[in-house]
Image (cartoon, coloured by chain):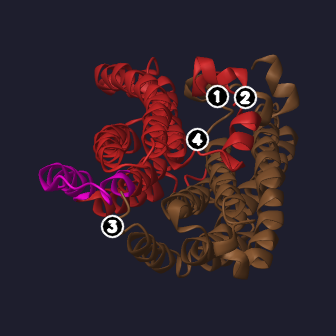
Chain colours: A red, B brown
Amino acid sequence: MTDASDQGLAAYSIDSFLHELASSAPVPGGGAAAALVGATAAALVSMVANLTIGRPRYAAVEVEMSAILTEVERFRRDLLRLADADAKAYEVVGAAMRLPRSTEAERQIRTEAIQRALVGAAAPPAEVMDLCRALVPLCLRLAARGNSNVASDAGVAGELAAAGVRSSVLNVRVNLAELKDADVVRRYENRIASATAGLSDDVDRLSAIVRAQIAPKGTA
Amino acid sequence: MTDASDQGLAAYSIDSFLHELASSAPVPGGGAAAALVGATAAALVSMVANLTIGRPRYAAVEVEMSAILTEVERFRRDLLRLADADAKAYEVVGAAMRLPRSTEAERQIRTEAIQRALVGAAAPPAEVMDLCRALVPLCLRLAARGNSNVASDAGVAGELAAAGVRSSVLNVRVNLAELKDADVVRRYENRIASATAGLSDDVDRLSAIVRAQIAPKGTA
């Protein structure tokens, strides 16, 4: 890892982040990628809100857009923080895996440490999943009522947020796979079911709204 | 824009890229976001290939994985380059829009300049779309035959690549909306049809493969 890792994902250059991601180092991996995509979606939502606020034509939605902007700026910060939390949680799993396993007592300690680490490692991707899911209805509102010149950007934000949800489902499940605590697994599976419920329908609706907004207006 | 813009997207820190994306500046926007997501997918494909190559258990797919790695490293470079090409093409559209339109002659020159600029602006997102689409079958091969410990990362790569395709469709269409040349529009619509054909099916297949690979193995 480069020095930038001390300050977290946000401080990386895009080039060096992608270089680290592509390498055989275990982190950053799919968890950081999903969080980054979610943060990119959040930033695009901010852009559309920023290009709507203060325009006389959109005065009627000014209060709504300002509220969305405040909310989504927090989402972006949280998603970047979760990328780092994900990497740290993964390192705990790796450290537990490397514990000695020569004796029965050591094997028991190691198994318990791995189980605890896996429970911890499922939390950051589950939070990324929930935040990305919460972005989708904001994209729908922006596409429908925000500045129509950037409706396609609201649509892109929705596609990226949906990919953030679906990617995070995989990132949660890879940690659940070896978990022995059926209650924990069930709780996460319920959370996955909530996050994915209606997602494809929402994205399809968003796509239809965006297409209507970007239809030829004959102004060119 | 910051100084980093002179060196292109790759030189930005993630934090400052997201800050610029979120701002009311017209670029970077949905085009750069889609290209970045595609480059992130490509980097994850590289990671899975790198974690497969050189492992005795995967010796049978070594040649295939090396070929994928070479191809996808080029994709990543091309996608970063296209993010910058997208921004430049958008600036040409903006400059054409700002041409004077006081006289009939000026209006004619402006309309033609806008039309030419819009044709140029559709090209980078269409290339991003095609590259992201080409990533999806590579993700399928990696998930099925690459290192099964990182199958979920191949799945995340596929979700991000699919989002890159769908986002780029919107980015192409927003440029087509005002285009008067029906032949150009038809050519791009055909290209969109090719890129999206079978995409959802491929992603569903990928998801099923990943789920099978990350099913409990009882090793923890």
Q: Residue B14, which numbered label?
A: 1
Q: Chain of mark 1?
A: B
Helix, strand or loop at label 2? It is loop
Quarter residue A212 falls in? bottom left
First of labels 2, 4 by sequence position: 2
Q: Residue A27, which numbered label?
A: 4
- From the viewer's side, name the closer residue of B15 and A82: A82
State the residue position of label 3.
B216
Labels 2 and 1 share a subunit: no
Looking at numbered disc 2 in the image, what kind of residue is underneath it? Ser
Q: Chain of mark 2?
A: A
Residue B2 lies, with reference to residue B109, above or below; the image says above
Q: Residue at x 51, y 62 (%)?
A: B149
Question: Percent position (x, y) of residue B197?
Answer: 56, 81
Residues drawn in magenta? A172-197
Task: Based on the picture, tell me whether residue B218 belongs to the magenta stretch.
Answer: no
Question: Percent position (x, y) of residue A36?
Answer: 53, 38
- From the viewer's side, name the closer residue of B38 and B194: B38
Q: Which numbered mark, 1 or 3, is in the foreground of this view? A: 3
> Would residue A185 appear left or right of A204 to someone viewing this image?
left
Which residue occupies the extreme left position in the image?
Answer: A183
